Amino acid sequence: MPNERFISYPAASPSGEQMLGWAGWNHADRARALTRLIEQRAIYDGWDAGRITPLLAGLAEVLPWVKQWHGEVDPAFGMSPADAFTAYLAKKQAEYRISDEDLRSWRPEPPRRGRPRKRPGAVGRQSR
């Protein structure tokens, strides 16, 4: 689909494969997708705090927009999505003992592209 746009969740797959979501999701949809991933990885894959942190950081990152645009009570939920996702994040942070600072400071590993660089002073392959 050449005109479609996607968002990536780089640390969300147990196999290390790239997981994609549709860029047309609103912020509440993104938060919902992340909470489902967090639950799946915790329950079915047994992920520990170190592996769950990137997903919780993603949820924390999207929460300000959920609060801004989805703060009203949703009749299907009986509460606002903003309140539901905020409470969920707080519960998971307590469960895994992950602070707000841990989430704010988390950064993905830089991508590894191209061939590995030679170390300075390394001798290249010699022809015979």
Image (cartoon, grey):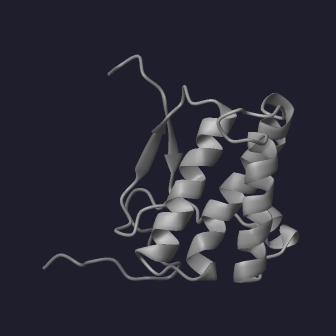
- Residue 77, horizontal then vertical, whole percent: 68, 41
Residue at the spot 71% in from the left edge and 71% down from the top edge: 92
Does residue 9 appear left or right of residue 126 in this picture? Answer: right
Rendered-image quadrant of the N terminus: top left
- Residue 33, horizontal then vertical, whole percent: 54, 47
Rendered-image quadrant of the C terminus: bottom left
Between residues 119 and 70, which one lies in front from this camera angle? 70
Viewer can see residue 65 = yes
The correct choice, above or below, for 62 with respect to 10 in the image is: above
- Residue 41, horizontal then vertical, whole percent: 48, 70
Does residue 64 appear left or right of residue 122 in this picture? Answer: right
Viewer can see residue 108 = no
Between residues 19 and 40, which one lies in front from this camera angle? 40
The correct choice, above or below, for 112 with respect to 74 in the image is: below
The correct choice, above or below, for 84 with respect to 99 in the image is: above
> Image quadrant of residue 81?
top right
Total number of numbered labels?
0
Residue at the spot 69% in from the left edge and 54% down from the top edge: 59
